[in-house]
Image (tube, helix red, strand yellow):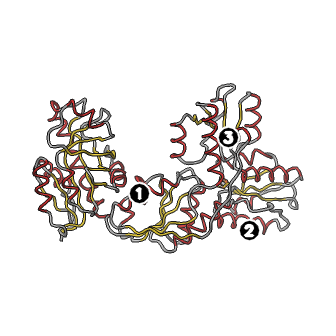
């Protein structure tokens, strides 16, 4: 049995693909399947079910929308009646290789697409039309299948430009061939272990709901100081609905509504908003507000507050601002050694809510050793959501070959989940979406742990599972270490 086959309708397409595979030690077999719907259907009927493990259909095609250019690659998500679930993985890998790749629906028609037809074909979101892919993809009969078509002509570069467009398309097919081979190499059966709990925490859900309700009740634009939560998907979605994210209040017009993010702000920011007459809605997580209150209380009692956290994080900036002359940021045991409190008997510590439990314990241990009478917060500052997600991913990492953590690079708690896995010796990768999964990571991997940071939407986890299922049979199970039922009330400004 040949593991992987690449179906290419025309000789010229097959040749470009074979050239692209020249450096490969064990290239997939490239089958020339014939031009047009009838030949493709005939050839599909001749493919023996057990003659291949996975199939890729490659060739050129007609771009249907004006935002496509000759040479662009379209990776099919749906091709005829076939769903190509791993399309985001392949498109992401193509983009990382420097190729202009998009995902979208591909239609197969029985004639060359006429100029007048493009708009109607594109009306349901279809990006590209060809004359062969659907019957060939159907012949995969449930095995992993991918369809990659290079645009030869578009509404703005119609068939009259086919020579230059066709050459650009063939160049792209050739360049895409080694990437397609990596996709084929990543195919195989796997299992996914989901960490429970994962994804949104109560503070993030509350912050998002505050912005949504503000948009509903006050209309767009609603300004939000900083990212409401550290997730590109969430921010992009709210932006699309009329939220305007700004770095500082001087970007907010006088009298406008401004939401403070879940990470909190310093008193200086509150004072500035009040001076400007801005309508403030505070989405600071109540667990961050608790740390702010502790900072004020310790400082008022004459304590030097050692704040364990990461420099530059918005939450840390906000907490430091509560008592700037009494609070010192300590990030490492070395920072503890360098600490010069006013009175060694009056030292207290606080923590950023999204720290690694292990890392924070190391720094608080160093503080305790140096200042035995040090005061601690009333209850843990590392919040329940951070603690629970780290415990859950630790359990999953122990059983996994690698762990995928859904979350954005600036999400502290998501980065801590990666570090938690690495601490137990399991490689882990932070990804914003399925498209960020590098196919090489999956080589030799049979069990994938999967979690999401507290700011990452559950939908991203679903998308990752769906994309992985396109690489072969996938079993999904969950390891639940604890369940969560915490909910926070909304501020009065958006309660109605
Ligand atoms: S991670 Fe913790 S502190 Fe941060 S918003 Fe969620 S519950 Fe609040």
- Mark 1 and mark 3 in contact (Cβ < 8 Å)? no
What's the residue at 19%, 36% (across, down)? 165
Eyeballing the image, is 146 above or below 158?
below
Q: In front here: 269 or 24?
A: 269
What's the residue at 38%, 65% (across, down)? 442
In the figure, is residue 90 to the left or right of 116?
right
Label 3 residue SS: strand
In the figure, is residue 221 to the left or right of 470?
right
The answer for how far apart the CA atoms under marks 3 and 1 are is 33 Å
Q: In which quadrant of the rendered image does the N terminus lie?
A: bottom left
Q: Earlier in the sequence, mark 3 or mark 1?
A: 3
Label 3 Cα neighbours within 10 Å, binned few <14 / some 14-19 / many ≥20: many
What's the residue at 56%, 72% (across, down)? 395
**Pointer 1 residue:** 437
The answer for how far apart the CA atoms under marks 2 and 3 are is 33 Å
Eyeballing the image, is 61 above or below 332?
above
> Could you tell me residue 151's position as x and y percent?
23, 41
What's the residue at 52%, 46% (across, down)? 232
- For ligand 1, give the image quadrant: bottom right
Label 2 residue SS: helix
**Pointer 3 residue:** 260
Q: Earlier in the sequence, mark 1 or mark 2?
A: 2
Q: In front here: 272 or 49?
A: 49
Q: Earlier in the sequence, mark 2 or mark 3?
A: 3
Residue that extends furthest to the top in the rendered view of this protein: 254
**Pointer 2 residue:** 365
| Between marks 1 and 2 in the image, the one whose residue lies nearer the viewer | 1
Task: Identify the disc placed on residue 83.
Answer: none
> Could you tell me residue 175's position as x and y percent?
24, 49
In the figure, is residue 411 to the left or right of 90?
right
| Between marks 2 and 3 in the image, the one whose residue lies nearer the viewer | 3
Residue that extends furthest to the front in the rendered view of this protein: 496
């Amino acid at each position: 049995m040949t593991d992987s086959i690449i179906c290419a309708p025309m000789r010229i397409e097959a040749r470009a693909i074979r050239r692209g595979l020249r450096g490969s030690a064990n290239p997939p077999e490239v089958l020339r399947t014939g031009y047009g719907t009838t030949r493709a259907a005939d050839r599909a009927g001749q493919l023996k079910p057990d003659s291949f493990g996975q199939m890729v259909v490659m060739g050129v095609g007609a771009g249907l929308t004006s935002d496509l250019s000759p040479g662009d690659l379209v990776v099919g998500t749906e091709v005829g009646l076939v769903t190509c679930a791993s399309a985001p993985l392949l498109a992401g890998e193509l983009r990382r290789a420097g190729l202009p790749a998009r995902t979208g629906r591909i239609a197969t028609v029985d004639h060359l697409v006429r100029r007048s037809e493009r708009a109607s074909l594109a009306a349901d979101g279809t990006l590209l039309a060809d004359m062969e892919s659907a019957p060939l993809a159907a012949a995969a009969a449930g095995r992993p299948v991918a369809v990659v078509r290079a645009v030869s002509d578009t509404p703005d570069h119609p068939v009259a430009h086919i020579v230059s467009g066709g050459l650009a398309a063939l160049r792209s097919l050739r360049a895409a061939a080694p990437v397609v081979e990596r996709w084929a190499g990543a195919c195989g059966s796997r299992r996914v272990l989901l960490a429970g709990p994962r994804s949104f925490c109560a503070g993030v859900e509350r912050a998002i709901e505050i912005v949504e309700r503000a948009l509903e009740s006050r209309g767009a634009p609603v300004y939000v100081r900083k990212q409401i939560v550290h997730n590109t998907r969430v921010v992009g979605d709210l932006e699309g609905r009329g939220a305007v994210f700004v770095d500082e209040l001087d970007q907010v017009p006088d009298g406008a509504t401004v939401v403070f993010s879940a990470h909190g702000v310093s008193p200086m920011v509150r004072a500035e908003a009040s001076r400007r007459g801005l309508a403030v809605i505070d989405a600071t997580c109540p667990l961050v507000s608790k740390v702010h209150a502790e900072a004020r209380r310790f400082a008022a009692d004459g304590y030097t507050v050692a704040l364990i956290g990461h420099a530059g994080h918005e939450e840390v900036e906000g907490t430091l601002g509560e008592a700037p002359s009494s609070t010192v940021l300590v990030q490492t045991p070395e920072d503890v050694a360098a600490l010069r409190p006013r009175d060694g008997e009056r030292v207290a510590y606080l923590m950023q809510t999204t720290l690694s439990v292990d890392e924070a314990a190391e720094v608080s241990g160093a503080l305790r050793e140096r200042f035995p009478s040090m005061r601690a917060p009333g209850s843990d500052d590392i919040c329940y959501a951070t603690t629970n997600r780290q415990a859950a991913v630790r359990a999953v990492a122990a059983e996994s070959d690698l762990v995928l953590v859904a979350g954005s690079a600036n999400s502290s708690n998501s980065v801590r989940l990666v570090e938690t896995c690495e601490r137990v010796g399991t490689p882990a990768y932070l990804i914003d979406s399925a498209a960020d999964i590098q196919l090489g990571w999956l080589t030799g991997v049979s069990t994938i742990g999967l979690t999401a940071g507290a700011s990452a939407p559950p939908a991203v986890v679903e998308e990752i599972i769906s994309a992985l299922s396109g690489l072969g049979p996938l079993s999904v199970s969950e390891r639940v270490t604890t369940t969560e039922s915490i909910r926070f009330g909304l501020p009065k400004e958006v309660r109605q």
